[in-house]
């Protein structure tokens, strides 16, 4: 499991997270950062889909697997795929890709779906940024998932950790040991596995606009997607619009504000308890979670809520029978604080500070 703690560094972390989808009709200029106009492209059975560069399709609503505990994620993935999901988001650091692979094998063997019917995303971890480590890391993910290729492979974070098999290397004082691999070195290695055919698309996660532009300007292959934390308390309008202008898709991780994050503190925002969100949901007979998911869909942003509870897995996918109005979307966008649920934090002199903020490639030192 991915492990970033806010106040305590544990084997949970806030990096959830995938890929994106924007309809072709929404590559226009939107100068009002407080409101992005809604749009979607309706596929079969009302599911919002988007064509990838390779011709593959994925649903804008997928299943996230971050924080899904061993023994639970296999059943969750299996149930999701049997319930209509066609997009599964994974990562090596989540520590559960073998279980995800077992679920995939089950549904493939039962004939529920074929491999080409489901979009699988995974991510390159921070300790594997050196060019010689990228391909072996991908091969390990493919072996664990039991696949011959990924639909999308993302660089999980722009800043790196010391290379090795320990996903969170630390010194004797408990400080994280970093690496400083240039972004383009890692991206060039990503391009190589793309050209080899081991992945159908490559992209980024938790990168800021300047870092994205560096990759676009210096690379041969443009990133297909960016995965970042997005929810009504962190709408990311400027970053989304920046990506749309470059025809880079966006995926929202922690779309419900990560209410089950193990580092939550008393007094922190609780998105799903927001009375205005509940009020909007009541109009449609929907829960606050369903409204938060549909909010991203109506903005053309893919969304990967995590759950291991069968009823919630089904509920999170049941968002295609209603559509938010422009007024609803404007109201929800007004919730923006902006507040991040998923930032690695440590305590220094009794105060919480962003753990990785001094790394030159830490993404959140920029506005967007």
Image (cartoon, rainbow, N blue to C red):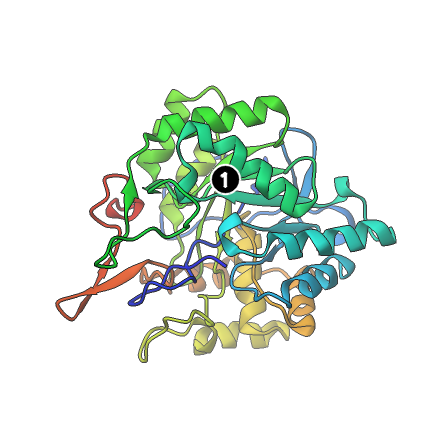
Farthest residue to the right: give it.
111
Name the residue at 29% across, 53% down.
170
Q: Position of residue 283 (x, y in %)?
A: 59, 74
Name the residue at 41% across, 52% down.
35
Taking depth in this image into account, of 366 and 80 the one nearest to the observer is 80
Query: Relative to 232, is 44 on the left or the right?
Result: right
Decide if residue 14 is in sight here.
yes
Name the residue at 41% across, 71% down.
262
Label 1 sits on a secondary structure element that is strand
Q: Quadrant of residue 129?
A: top left
Label 1: how many Cα within 10 Å (few below 14, some 14–19, many 20+): many
Taking depth in this image into account, of 258 and 50 the one nearest to the observer is 258
Query: Relative to 85, is 287 on the left or the right?
Result: left
Q: Quadrant of residue 172?
A: bottom left
In this picture, is 264 found above or below 48? below
Query: Relative to 206, is 106 on the left or the right?
Result: right
Count every numbered label the image shows and give the total. Answer: 1
Taking depth in this image into account, of 98 and 327 the one nearest to the observer is 98
In this picture, is 214 found above or below 287? above
Name the residue at 81% across, 44% down.
114
Q: Position of residue 101 (x, y in %)?
A: 68, 51
Q: Which residue is mark 1?
A: 154
Q: Position of residue 330 (x, y in %)?
A: 44, 59
Q: Quadrant of residue 287?
A: bottom right
In this picture, is 338 found above or below 161? below
Farthest residue to the front: give it.
172
The quarter of the image holding the C terminus is top left
Decide if residue 20 is in sight here.
no
In this picture, is 338 found above or below 57? below
Q: Position of residue 185 (x, y in %)?
A: 38, 26
């Amino acid at each position: 499991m991915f492990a970033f703690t806010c106040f305590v560094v544990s084997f949970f972390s806030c990096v959830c997270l995938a890929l994106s989808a924007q309809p072709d009709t929404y590559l226009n200029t939107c100068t009002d950062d407080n409101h992005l106009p809604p749009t979607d492209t309706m596929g079969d059975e009302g599911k919002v889909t988007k064509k990838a560069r390779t011709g593959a399709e994925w649903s804008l609503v997928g299943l996230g697997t971050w924080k899904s505990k061993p023994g639970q994620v296999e059943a969750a993935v299996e149930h999701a795929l049997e319930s209509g999901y066609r997009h599964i988001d994974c990562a090596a650091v989540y520590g559960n890709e073998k279980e995800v692979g077992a679920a995939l094998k089950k549904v493939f063997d039962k004939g529920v779906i074929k491999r080409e019917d489901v979009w699988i995303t995974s991510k390159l971890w921070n300790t594997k940024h050196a060019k010689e480590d990228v391909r072996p890391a991908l091969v390990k993910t493919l072996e664990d998932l039991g696949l011959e290729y990924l639909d999308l492979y993302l660089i999980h974070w722009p800043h790196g950790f010391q290379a090795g098999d320990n996903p969170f290397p630390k010194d004797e004082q408990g400080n994280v040991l970093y690496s400083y691999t240039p972004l383009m070195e890692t991206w060039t290695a990503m391009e190589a596995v793309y050209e080899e055919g081991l992945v159908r698309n490559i992209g980024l996660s938790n990168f800021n606009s300047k870092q994205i532009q560096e990759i676009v300007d210096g690379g041969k292959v443009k990133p297909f997607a960016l995965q970042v934390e997005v929810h009504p308390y962190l709408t990311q309008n400027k970053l989304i619009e920046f990506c749309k202008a470059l025809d880079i898709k966006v995926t929202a991780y922690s779309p419900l504000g990560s209410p089950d994050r193990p580092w939550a503190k008393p007094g922190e925002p609780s998105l799903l308890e927001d009375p205005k969100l509940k009020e909007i949901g009541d109009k449609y007979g929907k829960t606050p979670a369903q409204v938060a998911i549909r909010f991203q869909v109506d903005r053309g942003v893919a969304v990967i809520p995590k759950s291991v509870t069968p009823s919630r897995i089904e509920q999170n996918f049941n968002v295609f029978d209603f559509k938010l109005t422009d007024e609803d979307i404007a109201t929800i966008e007004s919730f923006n604080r902006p507040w991040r649920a998923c930032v690695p934090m440590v305590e220094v002199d009794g105060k919480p500070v962003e753990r990785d903020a001094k790394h030159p490639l830490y993404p959140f030192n920029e506005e967007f």
